[in-house]
Image (tube, helix red, strand yellow):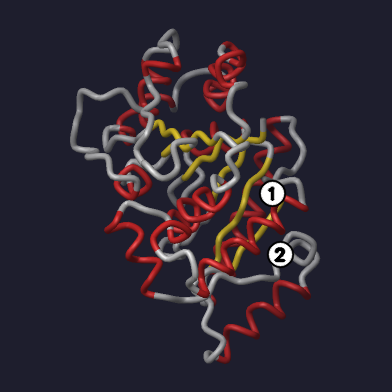
Amino acid sequence: MKSIAFGTLKGGTGKTTSCFNLAGALALDPNNKILLIDGDPQCNLTNDIGIDCSDMERNNIRTIFDNKKIEPSELIMHGMIEQLPNIDIIPSNILLIKTEMQLVSIAGREKLLANYFERNKDYFSQYTHIIFDTNPNLGVINQNIFYFVNSIILVSDVSLNAIQGAELFTFLWEENIEDLGITNNIKALIINNFDKRINLAKDLQDYYLSEAEFKDILVEIPIPSSVAMKDTSISHLPLVILQPHHQVTTAIKRVVKDLIIREVF
């Protein structure tokens, strides 16, 4: 089982859309069984897959922190994408913000999620990939996620703010892992919304390749800018299903292949 989290410290990079669409491409292989987990109180991944996150009674990622004895089977929703039945999801809830505040004073708070997965490892071992979406911060919930996963994938768009966000994320997480006693698990950087007509796009790619902290983790195949990606949120289908022959679909498949080679996926 591989565990992966998508992260950023800049909003608007298309992180959730990338997470949803790369997971969809990964699921084209029927040998893969994927569990998506929405760790963002904005519930974007939950909405993308077609779940109404306004249901306050439904179990979600927050339940793991509130009820550590809950069975995983009570959290997971199946069959949300008919064409990709090998994708399951644990949705999110806006009240995850409240949980974030409640965890601040708890000892060992960064390891609560990892402890839950360890206690239920026999159940979760049915999945080849567990993929988390996060929101752009390094709060307690995200620290739990980033501590647990094997790999963190940073997502950048084509902007100077995105560079600063990637640099700040790397700097702050490297400080955190010293305290947590783990090795650096930032394994990949994807450039999203790439438009080669914009001068900054190539400059940004060259910059990442020139920086020691990024050159070895940069996925050199960018995901092109396209309105087709926005359609995936409306249709609740990844682009590999919605438009299997689109140029962005081709790029997404190439990114997945690269991440498999890197042993991130």
Percent x, y for residue 152?
63, 47
| Drawn side of residue 239 relative to residue 214, left or right | left
Q: Residue at x 49, y 50 (%)?
A: 24
Establish if 60 lies above or below 169.
above
Asked whether, in this view, residue 44 is left or right of residue 222, the answer is left
- Quickly name the residue at label 2: 218
Q: Secondary structure at mark 2?
A: loop
119 to 32, vertically: above or below? above
Q: Measuring from the top left, give residue 61's x and y in whole percent.
A: 39, 28
- Against 134, residue 179 (above or below) is above
Residue 101 picture location, percent across and down: 36, 31
Nearer to the camera, 180 or 18 = 18
Question: Looking at the image, is mark 1 or mark 2 earlier in the sequence?
Answer: 1
User: Residue at (31%, 46%) from the top-left corner?
Assistant: 42
- Mark closer to the observer (1, 2): 2
Front residue of this view, candidates 6 and 144: 6
Query: Real-space Cα distance between discs 1 and 2?
Result: 11 Å
**Left/right of residue 222 with respect to residue 140 in the rendered view:** right
Q: What secondary structure is found at the residue carrying circle 1? A: strand
Residue located at (71% from left, 64% from top): 218
The residue where tag 1 is placed is 186
The C terminus lies in quadrant? top right
Task: Give the vertical position of 37 relative to 44 (above or below).
Answer: above
Q: 10 Å neighbourhood of mark 1: few (<14), some, or many (≥20)?
A: many
**Farthest residue toward the top?**
69
Q: Amino acid at mark 2?
A: Leu
Q: Quadrant of residue 181?
A: top right
Residue at point 40%, 31% (across, down): 90
**Amino acid tagged 1:** Ile
